[in-house]
């Protein structure tokens, strides 16, 4: 092998390593996040891209246009947002609404 072939193989291996180490995991994470958002249901707790925690109250799927999510942030604050505004689903019990609901259930028992 001459120097040109070795240089080509080195550059090719660097590109493949970059793909496997950086790009592939990022693509997998993105597809997992999109699947989580598509699977949102009423009652799921979410974190918005703005950093607000809320509970999904309704999922509106129009015939045309983006999916809209109605989110309850507690204390009577209910907003409609596009599905792209949802960063991720969070574990149950993270929002103020769910903690208030849990504490009211405990008092009622």
Image: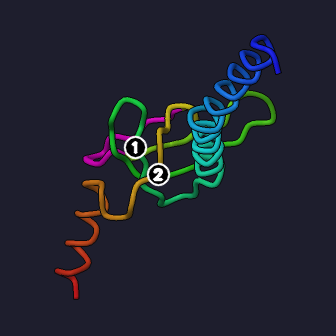
Residue nearest the viewer, comparing 55 with 93: 93
Q: Name the residue under label 1.
A: 47
Residue 74 belongs to the span the image colors magenta = yes
Q: At numbered mark 1, what does the secondary structure look like: helix, strand or loop?
A: strand
In the image, is 87 to the left or to the right of 50? right
Horizontal and vertical percent position of residue 88? 47, 45
Q: Which mark is residue 89?
A: 2
Give the position of the N terminus as an image quadrant: top right
In the image, is 96 to the left or to the right of 41? left
Q: How crowded is mark 2: few (under 14 residues within 10 Å), some or many (20 or more)?
A: many
- Residue at point 51%, 33% (across, down): 81
In the image, is 78 to the left or to the right of 105? right
Compared to residue 106, the image places residue 47 above or below, namely above
Magenta stretch bounds: 73-81
Task: Give residue 91's quadrant in the image.
Answer: bottom left
- Residue at point 55%, 50% (across, down): 58
Horizontal and vertical percent position of residue 51? 33, 35
- Residue at point 45%, 44% (across, down): 71
Q: Is the magenta stretch mostly helix, strand or loop?
A: strand
């Amino acid at each position: 092998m001459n120097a040109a072939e070795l240089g080509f193989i080195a550059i090719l291996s660097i590109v493949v390593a970059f793909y496997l180490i950086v790009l592939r995991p990022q693509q997998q994470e993105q597809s997992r996040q999109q699947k989580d958002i598509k699977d949102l249901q009423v009652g799921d707790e979410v974190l918005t891209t703005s950093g607000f925690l809320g509970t999904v109250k309704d999922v509106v799927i129009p015939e045309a246009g983006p999916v809209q999510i109605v989110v309850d942030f507690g204390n009577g604050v209910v907003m409609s947002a596009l599905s792209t505004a949802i960063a991720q689903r969070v574990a149950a019990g993270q929002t103020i609404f769910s903690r208030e609901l849990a504490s009211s259930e405990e008092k009622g028992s």
